[in-house]
Amino acid sequence: MNTAFLPAYSLSDFDFDLPESLIAQHPATERSASRLLDGSAAAPADRIFRDLPGLLNPGDLLVFNDTKVIKARVFGEKASGGKLELLIERVLPGHEIVAHMKVSKKPLPGAHILLAVGEADCDAVLLGRWPDEQGALFHFKLDQDPYALMERCGHVPLPPYITHTDTAEDERRYQTVFARAPGAVAAPTAALHFDDALLQALDARGVERAHVTLHVGAGTFQPVKTEQLDEHVMHREWYEVPELTQQAIARCRQRGGRVIAVGTTTVRSLESWALSGQATGDTQIFITPGFAFQVVDRLVTNFHLPKSTLMMLVSAFAGYTHIRQLYQHAIAQRYRFFSYGDAMLLSRAPTGTP
């Protein structure tokens, strides 16, 4: 990989000014009625998301993330009566969970807390920090099944930039139509634009479909705090690239099709598999300009937060300069940003493109 002429990027290079009015607070009336910025050619083109099949070729392969968002936000209280909030990041065997905890004073290991007071009255024992004593997450053992608890009493873990409390609409729309494997605390948002009619249109176009699973963690919203990118510690997420998907990619290559990732989580899954040779496990892959992509040819993605690792990923994929131009166009044309916002279609730039 020749990166000799790539500029040395730092955190401030991925900042931009976004009018607050462009942060989408609710989804479009229809999933596929969102706008689509076609950035796969030299000049950006404004389209509607349901136009996507016409931008793809028969024989292309779309790869989706089939993770399912769990109602991971659960409220409770300490033995003292102090209120707290858990955001359940991961469910472990034996009714154990790993969670972020929001509370005025952190309880000590061995402390009991009560979750879903008056609804499920779930007793939870704090076992300690996770994944080690310095970890930012907390490890609990519950006296009942965590998934059943969340289904009865949990709340949709809407991103921090969505200001309303979760509703029945969010429970339906902050979830893809093909969500299968429960475990995510954030939706794979590029896939939210697909509805059954659009999937049928893709089938009619001759576009094949496959799935990976990556359970999106709350770390996806955490800002990068170090100006030097190589000092950033990437969050950890579990992924799987099934054998059937590996076979679909091989067939796509053989027929000359393009592998199109739906969302950055799909990119992270596929490129983690290609880089490590491991089809399942935890990934901390951090994709920045200069990264050599091995699998993904095109990308469908939403518009991302300033100074985020996802801004760095799309800049690495399509070229830093091209992404800056596309974002300027999107802001000028008043595209809707972030999880409930609009999308864009990108092509992979040659390695070494600034």
Image: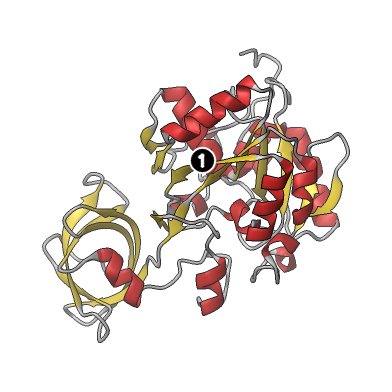
Query: Can residue 298 be seen from the camera position used here?
Result: yes
Task: Tell me: residue 85, above or below residue 192.
Answer: below
- Residue at 25% x, 82% y: name it: 117
Q: In which quarter of the image is residue 248?
A: top right
Residue 133, x across and y down, in percent = 21, 46
Image quadrant containing the N terminus: top right
- Residue at 35% x, 71% y: name it: 151
Q: In this image, 290 relative to 44: left or right?
A: left
Q: In this image, 169 relative to 103: left or right?
A: right
Residue sitting at the far left: 110
Q: In which quarter of the image is residue 73?
A: bottom left
Residue sitting at the far bottom: 118
Residue 307, x across and y down, in percent = 61, 46
Q: In this image, 255 relative to 99: left or right?
A: right
Residue sitting at the far front: 204
Image quadrant containing the C terminus: top right
Amino acid identity at mark 1? Thr
- Residue at 77% x, 52% y: name it: 36
Query: Can residue 309 be seen from the camera position used here?
Result: no
What colouring style does the render use?
Answer: secondary structure
Count residues near mark 1 (Cα–Cα under 10 Å), then give few for <14, some for 14-19, many for 20+.
Answer: few
Residue 16 or residue 205, whichever sits in front? 205
Q: Which residue in the structure is indicated by mark 1?
A: 226
Residue 107 or residue 227, whichever sits in front? 107
Residue 121 or residue 255, whichever sits in front? 255
Residue 19, x across and y down, in percent = 74, 63
SS type, badge 1: loop
Residue 190, x across and y down, in percent = 62, 52
Residue 73 or residue 263, whichever sits in front? 263
